[in-house]
Amino acid sequence: MHSRWLTNRTNPEYVRYLSQSASISPVFAQVLINRGLKTAADINDFLCPGLTHFSDPYELPSMRTAVERVKAALQRKERILVHGDYDTDGLTATAILLQALKRIGLDVHYFVPNRILHGYGFHNPGVDMAKKLGASLIITVDCGITSLETVSCANKAGIDVIITDHHEPLKGEGQGAGGKGQKELPHRSSLITHQLFKLPEAIAVVNPKLGDCNSRLSNLSGAGVAFKFAEALAMEGGLPFSRDDLLPLLDLAALGTLADVVPLTGENRAILKEGLKFIHDGSRPGIRALKEVSGLNGKETRAGRLAYTLVPRINAAGRIADARDVVKLLLSEIEEESQELSSWLDSLNSRRQQIEEEVYQKALERLRETDMTSAIVLAGEGWHQGVLGIVASKIAEKFYRPTFIFSVENGVAKGSARSVPSFDICKGLAESSRLLLSFGGHKQAAGIKLKVEDLPAFEKAIKEIVQDSLDASDLQPALEIDANIRLSEVTPELVQELSLLEPFGFGNPEPLLGSKALAVVSPRIVGNKHLKMRLKRESLSLDAIGFDMGGLLEELQDSAVVDAVFTPAINDWNGGRCLQLILKAVRPSA
């Protein structure tokens, strides 16, 4: 699908002013303005998000109550169950809290639900495990915000619950909101409005979605919330858990933050940037072994690289097996055990790729018979539930439509949904909730369950909701170009400046620059399907490569004139270094 090219523009005088006041190039100034950074102080805070920039964990709702309850558990020598989730965010969050609570001296155990046997979230099997262990306190991580009935069940069994989560809470008329004995919790926003949520009757509900939506903490991952909980414990003078114990947890928090595709700004950026240093150092045996089986030894530790290597391997267990041993790997201090578990994950990931491809191809076959004017809804008997989210992501990206993929079994359709940036998928599901047994997630991703007989009605309803919410331009991908520049402005100094924006990811994408009327010189295919050429303007020409863009070769004759979108880089090859344009898109120049 062809993308619209959208170029961000700012008053040139303001760009020059910011360039001079922050001592940066005009191109870099424009890129930063596009990210909402409009003063030299804002720029410095963004580019240098060190440990001193961490926010006070007690800004999170109910954090003080949660900490006091943990301190009471220590004094009473209670047993605690940490209830996690089976994806990378939930598993790293589980490991963070386990390591912190054990260091404090608490008797702590953990439970990770099995995707197939238990489903997603905090449900009765977690309470049953707490009863079996004799635990008097359950702490959830990365789940629980919508588990009203399960928390009630735990309360009846005499088990206290602390919810730590980052998912969207249920909206309602204040039923069971807040802590025990409270009826409602107001949601604060920049508009000073009050929206009531249905919340579990837990001892504490620690969720940034219940606080100030403009806070640096508002978009934390589940692992990020767990890390802030550990940070709050480290601030308590009477506990045997210090800042020195806290900081080594940043590698786990960074992996969870990266995996859950939360905006890499504010606190998330600080967590990831600092955590990448610990991952690179390889002080944790489990992560060191994972890097080895992923082929990362000796390579620079970059966020994008980890997202396509470590994260899928960690996720593989929760997708097609049981994820409990992943926590064991993340906390292991034994090299042999770490290597064995990492090899197990590597083989699971290979199997996951095979299953994913099988379901993806079946989904594409179904798609040929489906109207996809506004949204895509596909279902198949026995499709593996563990890969539905990945398949939905691939189809949503390929066809640029909100996508819902279901596996049908025993009269129930369980599915995953992925959206496009312009459509809030959780809001859409809320509007069709009368047809659903359950749902939950974020604006861009969700899990859904409904009766099979309701699938046709759901498909009709969600397509109408999408059609009413979006116009045609919302369903066409857009290539957002940070700045149009001259080829002469591509310099090693600019590459160095742009590298300061790392780590890249959701909310902080790799910058895209554009240049017009460039002459194509010596276009050719390298490798299997990569497009290689030089792009020339007047007397200056630069090397350019477009990965997986070999299909464009027939359109690019020598001396053709094109517009190009690219990210500038330094190519290190055979001991030499040269400027190179990493192509993202090319079109004939008007």
Image (spheres, helix red, strand yellow):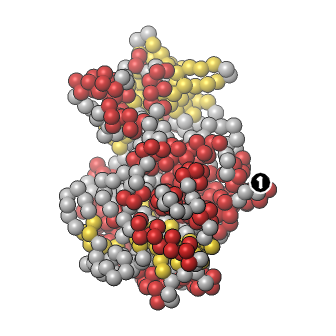
Q: Answer with left or right where residue 372 lies relative to residue 365.
A: left
Q: Quadrant of residue 494?
A: top left
Q: How many marks?
A: 1
Crowdedness near tag 1: few (<14), some (14–19) or many (≥20) residues, C-alpha within 10 Å: some
Residue sitting farthest toward the right = 336
Q: Is residue 404 in sight in this rendering?
A: no
Q: Which residue is mark 1?
A: 335
Q: Residue at x 37, y 76 (%)?
A: 179
User: Relative to the observer, which residue lies in front, 568 or 302?
Assistant: 302
Q: Is residue 575 above or below residue 319?
A: above
- The image shows residue 37 at horizontal and vertical percentages of 32, 37
Q: Is residue 234 in sight in this rendering?
A: yes
- The image shows residue 95 at horizontal and vertical percentages of 60, 62
Q: Residue at x 29, y 72 (%)?
A: 185
User: Relative to the observer, which residue lies in front, 520 or 217?
Assistant: 217
User: Relative to the observer, which residue lies in front, 502 or 201?
Assistant: 201
- The image shows residue 188 at horizontal and vertical percentages of 26, 62
Residue sitting farthest toward the top = 539
User: Relative to the observer, which residue lies in front, 419 or 531?
Assistant: 419
Q: Is residue 136 above or below residue 551?
A: below
Q: Quadrant of residue 501?
A: top left
Q: Is residue 313 above or below residue 204?
A: above
Image quadrant containing the C terminus:
top left
